[in-house]
Structures are given as C-alpha cells and as structure tokens.
Image (tube, grey):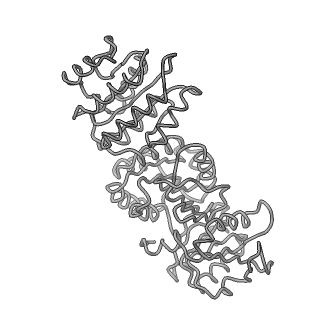
Amino acid sequence: MKTTKKILNKIFNPRTVALIGVSARKNSVGRGIFENLLEGAKLRKIYPVNPNYKKIFGRKSFHSILDIKNEIDLAIIAVPSGVVLKIVKECSQKRVGGIVIISAGFSETGKKGKILEKKIGKEVKKTNIPLIGPNVLGIIRPSVKLNASFAPAAPKKGKIGLVSQSGALIDSIIDKSLLENYGFSSIISTGNEINLCVTDFLEYLASDKETKVIALYIEGLKDGKRFLKIAKKCSSKKPIVAIKSGKSQIGGRAVSSHTGALAGDYQVYKAAFEKANIFEVQTIEELLEISKTLAWQPRTKNGIGIITNGGGCGILAADFCEDSGIELTKLKKETIRNINRSPFSHSGWSKKNPVDIIGDDNPKRYKVAVENLLKQKNINGLIVIETLQVMTNPLENAKEIVKLHKKYPQKPIISCFLGGKYTRPGVEFLEKNKIPNFSNLKTAVLAMKALLLL
C-alpha cells in the first residue's frame, strides 16, 4: 500500500483515539493500552469502546465505535480475533483515519487465520484506510505523548525511529532504554503486515523531522523490490541500521510461526542491505548502540585517530579497524611536534597512531592529545580509550573530551572508557553530552565504521 505522510499523521499524531476492547481487568491488554493512552489525554480525546461497560475509569464507554459522534483519527482494536473483522467493518463505516489491530490469532496460527487476514485486508483496501497489524504491540510516539501499545512503559524521547516485526522485542528494548541513554522518535510494531509494512514506515520516517536514524528488526519481506527501492532513497537522507533474523533453517521456520512471514534466503537480504547502503548488525545490543551513535554523532570520511592510555588496547583497536576497513591516519610532523612540546606529555608517548599517552595519564595529557589530533585536518574522527589506573581521573578526562568535541563538532568522537564502578562517573558525563561510550573495543570500532561515509 502506497502511503503519504499526511495519511500516516492521523495514526502517529491523532486528535481522537478510540480503543475497542478496553477493559478494567488488571493485567489485561485492554487496560494496559487504555492506561498508556491516558498519559497523552491532555493532547487528544480518548474514547473507550466496550459494550460490557457503561463507564470505565470515570469515562463513558461506548457500545460501538459507530456510537461516537466525533470523527476518529485512530482506532485501536484489542478484541478476540474472531470479532476483529466485524469491528474493522464498523471502522470502515465510521471512516476512521487509521487502524491498529493489537489482537493475535491470524496467519501465525495457520490456514483459518490466513483466511481471516485476507478478509480484513480486502475490507480496508476498499476504503483505503491504513492499517497496522494484526498481532502487534502497538505504536509509540514520545514527542506527542502517544503510547498506543501495551508496553509496560514509555521510552525516552530521542532521534531513533525503531520499526520491528517483533512486538515482545520492543518491550525489552524499552525496558533497557530506561536505564541507558536510548531515545526514540517513534516505535512501531508491524506484526503480520496485512496492509502497512516495514517499507511504508521506512518511507514515513525518512521524511519525519523527529527522526535522525532508522533502526529495523526484520524477519521477512513481502515485496523485496519495493523495499530495496525505498530503502535506497531513504538511506540517502538518513542512516538505516538493520538486523535480520531467520538466517538459519530453524530460524526461518520460527519466523513463519511467529508472524506468518517467509524469512527468505539470507544472502538475498544481505545483498539488498549492501545495495541500499543499510548498515547491518548481528545483535540487538549492536542495533541499539549503533543507532544511538548515529543519532548523536556526525557522519565523516575515512581516516581516524586512536588515543589510549593503554598500549595493548590501542593495538587491539587498530586490529579491529583494519578488519573493518577503517584507515588510521598518519600523524603529521607538526602534530607530533606540538604534542612533544607540551609540558604535560610523557616523553615515551608512541609518536604514532594509535597515540599511546602512557598509563600514568592525567586530564591535561588527554587534552593535549585529543586537541592536537582534532586539529590535524585529515584526521576525521577519534576513538578515545581509557583504562583505569590509580592516577586515572575518568570524570575529568571526560570533561576535557566534551569541551574539545564542542570545539570541533564536525568530527565524531567515540569513547571506550573501560571499567566499572570507578569509571562510571566519566561514562555518565560523556553520554549526557551525547558522546557514546562502549564497554568493548570491537563495538566501539563498529560504531565508528557506521559513521563513515564510505
């Protein structure tokens, strides 16, 4: 289904929302969605629909969506699958702006479910009503306080647009984000995709001002050619990070029973990702970490510098860079001379890239190294590594890095402050100031690779 931003805006920024299947029962999906919707009640009108209630949570409950006099921008359906087609027909009659079907029990369950899905698909196609689902967690748009889902909490506002064919995975990502620094412009659970699909949301987020980077969890695609065409266009505007599940035979069968989709040949997906300039990752942690980096740091050309107070870590980082196609820029004589002249530099520093400033470092020594490498025109970004010694001051080191990044904002900085308890204050300060920190060198290098305009 071809969509426009204007059509999807009724879903992602609705003035009126009807929840069909609202419930007062504790720990029920209908209650969870309603409580989440109420968080944005000051920005929109919310209509509970359930013929078993006259009132619910102090609000009038409607017998049917057809009993609501006002226009409805977004209808959310959370009823047993056998009733969904009837409700969708009523939504069509009401001419709602968009539909989200939370309910499961469709193509993922077998032949009967597939038949029911087809009937629902034909119904919304007749009226051209955009539909998300079925079998979804819902959608979340933090900037407009829209939480049309049964997720346990709302995530922080940010610049990552997440589109996932798994709803349960989103719950875990949100939970993790509350303890970390991931922020989202939108979170979209696509489910069985009988109408709107991953490609539609990719197109929407590409033109969304709130979104800086798009993250995708993909199990299978129904129209690979359209996805490739749209993804190529989107990646020229915004970076796309993706993880593909169902690569193995066992995983592929699991995909079919999860959303009814076909996983397809992984090599085909891999080739498509490369053609569309999509940055593929292998783990959910990488999906989040790389997306966060792209949301926080500028893109850059190849040719970077590494600074470390531990020679071994610098060597490992250099190895990972070579494996990833990242070039380490040779230090110019002027750069070496300026570092040598500083009274804070150690005479035994490496004189080459990676720049080993020696273990008994201090904040001023970090400042000298970071500033002089950033000054060198053909060093386009930095990976700054810190290991913890008795004399190390992670917080003060972090402050110097942040100051210099503000002075050279066009050059990305990735930090890798290794440690735990004593390193934590420095890590928190870096991330508070949008410099991503990684607890392992390989992921730090991967993040830098994602920033390179290769």
- Left/right placement of residue 326 relative to residue 86 reads left
| Image position, residue 10 (x, y; %) | 51, 74
Q: Residue at x 79, y 68 (%)?
A: 24
Up-down relation of residue 396 to residue 428 (above or below): above
**Quadrant of the snapshot with the C terminus:** top left
- Residue 284 sits in which quadrant? top right
Q: Residue at x 33, y 45 (%)?
A: 299
Q: Nearer the viewer, residue 159 or 30?
A: 159
* Outermost front residue: 343
Q: Is residue 269 above or below residue 147?
A: above
In the rendered image, the residue lying farthest to the top is 348
Q: Is residue 110 above or below residue 97?
A: above
Q: Quadrant of residue 363?
A: top left
Q: Residue at x 42, y 63 (%)?
A: 208
Q: Can you give x and y, in whole percent of width and height, for residue 105 in the image?
A: 69, 64
From this viewpoint, which residue is outermost toward the left?
333
Tag count in the figure?
0
Q: Position of residue 287 (x, y in %)?
A: 49, 45
